[in-house]
Amino acid sequence: MVDSGTPISGYRFIEKIYESSRTLVIRAKRESDAVPVVLKLMRNEYPSLNELVQFRNQYAIAKNINLPGVVKVYSLETYQNRYALVLEDFGGISLKDYTQQQCQSFTNGAAPLCTAPLLPVADFLTIALQIAAILDRLHRLHIIHKDIKPANILINPTTKQVKLVDFSIASLLPREIPEMQGVSVLEGTLYYISPEQTGRMNRGIDYRTDYYSLGVTFYELLTGRLPFVADDRMEVVHCHLAKYPPAAHAINPDIPPIFSAIINKLMAKNAENRYQSALGLKADLERCLQQWREAEAIDEFELGTCDQIDQFVIPEKLYGRGQEVNTLLAAFERVSQAAAELMLITGFSGIGKTAVVNEIHKPIVRQRGYFIKGKFDQLQRNVPFFAFVQAFRDLVGQLLTESDARLHQWKSEILAAVGNNGQVMVDVIPELEGIIGLQPPVPELAGSAAHHRFDRVFQQFIQVFATATHPLVIFLDDLQWADSASLGLIQRVMGEAHLRHVLLIGAYRDNEVSPAHPLTVTIEQVRQSGTAVHTLRLPPLDSTHINHLIADTLNCSIARSQPLTALVYRKTQGNPFFTAQFLKALYDERHIVFNADEGCWQYDIAQVNALSLTDDVVEFIGLQLQRLPNATQTVLKLAACVGNQFDLKTLAIVRQESESSTAAALWTALRDGLILPVNEVYKLFHHRSRDDAPPFAIDRSPRYRFLHDRVQQAAYSLIPPDQKQITHLKIGQLLLKNTPTHEREERIFEIVNQLNVGAGLLTRPGDRTQLAQLNLMAGRKAKLSTAYSTANNYFAIAMQGLPDDAWQDHYALTLALYTEATEVSYLKGDFDSMERLGAIVLEQAESLLDTIRIYETQLQAYSGLNRFDDGIAVRTGII
């Protein structure tokens, strides 16, 4: 704990302002110059990473804001293991405390707590106008506050000056994509967050999130209560997503009904229906104040007539996909009542498959269903269960944020379902150990028994989360890149008649999947098992829908946007992703500009027509990438080699630069929306400079993902063809060199997949032998998770790299490889390869002991095939 009397040296304590479990805020005087300051200190002796990120973020953003309506930040001090912020003291108190004081003053101190608002209408409007003006200036600096609430709005009781404070979770990005998290760790203050901030809305967070939180703030100031209150935190989230509060004037009849209308507009569920600018809000508040001063009454009027959408925002709402969304929702309703279903969404890249599926996220959460998702990666096709692991790691991450009592309940339910086989799931989802604890080792099973056990345990595991009251929706994106183990799991689990209340949604590019493609075969096998299989094919949007999108983007009539629509449609052919990128490029190159005098967006169609622009989306994005700084281009090319998702630590290793330098190189791509942060830790590095680096070890690396596969593909295309192999090889070598031996198995797929791309460039025998050893490790790990085809691939690559005299010079390695390859050939049903490889081992083995596993495999195979004579021959051979 911090001693409130002696917080940090150089400051003299005056009084405590506020105290919570995490922070202490005190009024003090700086001894060097007697300047009054406010100190915000961390209370925990060992603050969490989240606390460190938020303190540094608050300092890094606020120190560069020079606005009269924002509390100045003087410095960020370090003491012990903690931070302290030194802030301007302008004599302000929080709006929450101010309204309470007003109430007690009105009641002569008789009421310890005030339940009714006592801000006169004129005072409220004066304060509201100041807040609107502050937000206008803040948003013009491209800063999103993300935590507007009475506690973060300060007012000087004497001068009535209002200032905004606490930029702990503020963002400098034009748009953030929140990840699905447990309600206990949501960013922001639960009762004030916007629907999109919950991560359950399929919407990005932009500056308009602040308007929703401001609406909640106005509601509280005018009614004395919050719009949504519930004992269950998840219920509060549900209210933000789906419910509407009672009208403010119905609770407080002393306020004009127009205030309720303003609050309703601020608190619209979809950002497109809120105020689009603080200036629009300010104009309405000024009109209210003028009428009140003239007549102490305010007539109702149309709101938002002065709204100016001067930030270029492409709407996230779906156009022309209502029927498809309804079809998905109907499927969800069916699985809520009965058996499992497989729903397939097909179409070209960028056609909106992911967007359509994500659109049902909100209704599913509203009905208390679970929605989890994973994405296959074209560069990670040899990683077993790649998207499944992503999806269930996401689910486990959500569960780990719940209360201890709920975690204990989950532990009991999971263990009751999987019994003594918990380790089977922990091997695939290591994070699960945080819920169910250390598990006893499972017995090693021979042959297909391991396969059957994994399938059974996996089905038991998912059935814990799939019930009539909590149906489970699993979304697997980019199935055209699914690994063979994942396809097998889909076929076996979805073909199980006892599976209930599970909706598996798979999206894939049907133009990349032939009739002979493994995915096609898998789908047909599921269909033949009797499981309901439905397919939705998404066509390109027609020009009418594209015109509505462009008209909404430019905030103009559809007639005015039509000429631009005709040009854009010719280039993009109704592809939503390409359309959005095309419009953004026109804006970035100032072919679309905002006319402040007329309050609208304008374009010169002749100028746009004269542009020489490609109609190939990858080439188009590649040209946009080439305009980025060289350092950003280089780091994006390396990231594209790593995968659709990547972390800063790995990227710094393969770039051979510091994490701070690498983060700086990524910033332009982040700001332009080409890559997106997966967690908030990125703020700790993108705000870092040499003179204010944190004195604490950071144990979690920022993670990012590409906006879209086409962006990753475009970045990858910037690598010259003759450099691709050597780039992958170098990445693999650097990862291997920088991965401690005890962590090597955990990252083995990541390392080996890079090295294998450049295997043909290895000339030294020692390097090829080392690669064979690494592939042996990868193959064994894949085999352990019953991904037999994947394991076979690793063993085959390893054997190809062995020298001619491998049986003489590398006997142990060669024996292990051939023995493992024989076993997985049997397990995957390739009996010809089993016999061929087994015969080589029997011929080369130096002792009977070295042949035992081959004989065991042969006996199991011949028994299963009813080849009893061959089985007798094997036994005779052993004797």
Image (tube, rainbow, N blue to C red):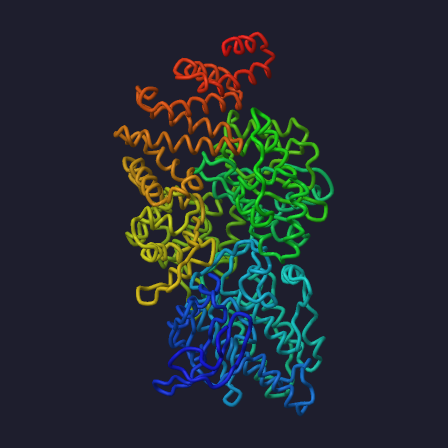
Against 2, is 847 above or below? above
Q: Which residue is painted at 42% across and 52% down in the image?
A: 675
Locate residue 664: give its quadrant.
bottom left
For the residue pair 443 and 431, the one nearer the viewer reads as 443
Against 518, is 589 above or below? below
**Residue 854 visible in the shown view:** yes
Against 736, is 399 above or below? below
The x, y position of residue 169, in whole percent, is 48, 65
Horizontal side, residue 412 vs residue 708: left or right:
right
> How many numbered markers are drawn?
0
Horizontal side, residue 517 vs residue 293: left or right:
left
Locate residue 39: give its quadrant.
bottom left
For the residue pair 251 and 276, the one nearer the viewer reads as 251
**Residue 541 visible in the shown view:** no
Q: Which residue is painted at 30% across and 64% down in the image?
A: 690
The x, y position of residue 704, in whole percent, is 43, 51
The x, y position of residue 590, in whole percent, is 36, 59
For the residue pair 292 and 490, the one nearer the viewer reads as 490
The x, y position of residue 698, in whole percent, is 41, 58
Residue sitting at the far bottom: 108
Residue sitting at the far right: 337
Locate residue 768: give its quadrant.
top left
Residue sitting at the far left: 764
Q: Which residue is painted at 59% across and 88% down in the image?
A: 293
Against 416, is 257 above or below? below
